[in-house]
Image (cartoon, rainbow, N blue to C red):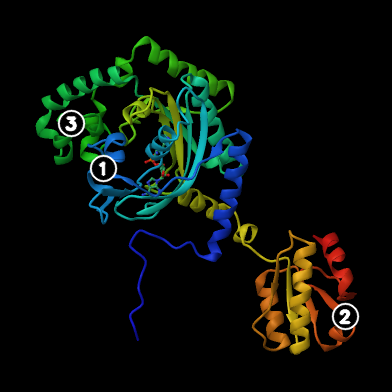
Amino acid sequence: MVKALQAVRGMNDVLPDKIGYWQYVENIIRQVTLAYDYAEIRLPIVESTDLFRRSVGEVTDIVEKEMYTFDDRNGDSLTLRPEGTAVCARAGIQHGLLYNQIRRLWYMGPMFRHERPQKGRYRQFYQLGVEAFGMAGAQIDVELIAMNARLWQQLGLQDKLTLQINTLGSTQERAQYRDALRDYYSAHHAALDADSQRRLDSNPLRILDSKNPEMQALNAGAPKLLDYLGAESQAHFKQVQGLLTALDIAYEVNPRLVRGLDYYCHMVFEWVTQELGAQGTVSAGGRYDGLVEQLGGKATPACGFAVGIERIVALLQKQVANTNVLQAPHAYMVTFGDAAQQAGLALAEQLRHALPALSLRVDCSGGSFKNQLKRADKSGAQWVLIIGDDEVAQQAVALKFLRDEKPQQVLKQSELASQLQQLM
Ligand code: HAM
């Protein structure tokens, strides 16, 4: 036998028994983004490598070691997108969507990072991304957080997630802070791990983000960015907090929250859960006022976030019973004999025409009545539509209720659509 091929490590198939969760999440995403009047944008999966080098940053985990980068047949360096914000900004600039304009956009789709796979961390994973361009005030930061909170509420996950916020200040303030960090860590050079020593010159802020437990004590004593913020940055952050309180959105200020991408400034946030082990960040984002200009557009304030869909699905699976989100047809049709097969297919087409919202599965696999009925039950359908020789002769159909204690009915085929409509 030929050896069967496997999916690439860290890249998952979403099988039919789980797809209900995904569709449930996708429907709620559509509702919530519509409620705030954000427009969908569909973006390519492959971009020029330069885009991510210039936006995410040269000295970040993503660019240093996680990108799927390859030369195409023309020798151009291309990359499977590791995130969507840079792609969205690139598209906005290219199509003139951002120039002196306000834009509220969202996208959903796969992202690719060559990380070490573990539960909740994959090499292909899906994100909902939401980006707001052209607004500088704290109001839009909080609109985005409120939208994110509404998403949790609609999904029934509000009790599982807590909001952490921080401010990174302006680009200049961060530069001063970076110098202070460099001085501090240089004075403790021997205590730095190899990664941190390498980052000392290029990006000492990333040392703070180290996952190495041996770096924790040193990091705890490091200078705090909050002490380097100017009046304007402080006012912005205060306003964010005031608006969150006014909207009754609970939050914690986490001064260690620095984010792993270089484009952020001012307010950043993460929604975290205790229920998913090490990969507990379900949504993350913040302001990135410099990015559009950095990518060749006119300076444009911007803010956004991205939600990891696999992580939401994992949370939902813990609490929503499978049966609530499993796809089941309303009705299942079984037929006997050649004439009934033909009459059944024709009747099924008439029903789908008359009732576009009806989900009807026809048992096209033949077999005994008993086996067809077994399959009907397994499908989760409410009703079985039965057609045999007698029904064909009388242009009738038997309607059997699988989930209610109601007696079977025999109906004229012409009456079936209106009868089902009442039942739906
Ligand atoms: P990020 O923090 O890199 O931000 O990713 C956002 C979310 O995507 C994470 O909180 C997590 O839920 C999910 N995620 C990231 N990596 C993986 C992975 N390997 N496996 C499964 N899920 C993952 C961004 O990507 C920014 N573009 C967010 C943003 C939008 N900022 C402003 N606008």
Q: Mark 3 CB in 8 Å range of ligand 1?
A: no
- Looking at this rendering, what residue extends furthest in the front direction? 74
Residue 412 pos. (x, y %): 90, 75
Q: Which secondary structure lies at badge 2?
A: loop
**Quick one: 156 or 351, which is closer to the camera?**
351
**Quick one: 414 or 287, which is closer to the camera?**
414
Q: Quadrant of the N terminus?
A: bottom left
- Amino acid type at mark 2: Gln
Q: CA distance from mark 1 to mark 2?
A: 67 Å
Confirm or deny contact between disc 1 and disc 3 (CB under 8 A): no
Q: Which residue is mark 2?
A: 395
Pointer 1 or 2: first along the chain: 1
Q: Which numbered mark, 1 or 3, is in the foreground of this view? A: 1
Specify the quarter for ligand 1: top left
Q: Quadrant of the C terminus?
A: bottom right
Q: Which residue is mark 3?
A: 202
The structure residue drawn at horizontal position 25% and vertical position 34%, both measured from the top left corner, is 216
Pointer 1 or 3: first along the chain: 1
Q: Which secondary structure lies at badge 1?
A: helix
Q: Is residue 246 left or right of residue 334?
A: left
Q: Is residue 350 left or right of residue 268?
A: right
Number of residue marks: 3
Confirm or deny contact between disc 1 and disc 2 (CB under 8 A): no
* Residue 392 drawn above or below residue 63: below
Q: Which residue is mark 1?
A: 63
Observer able to see residue 156: no
What crowding class fits label 3: few (fewer than 14 Cα within 10 Å), some (14-19), or many (20 or more)? some
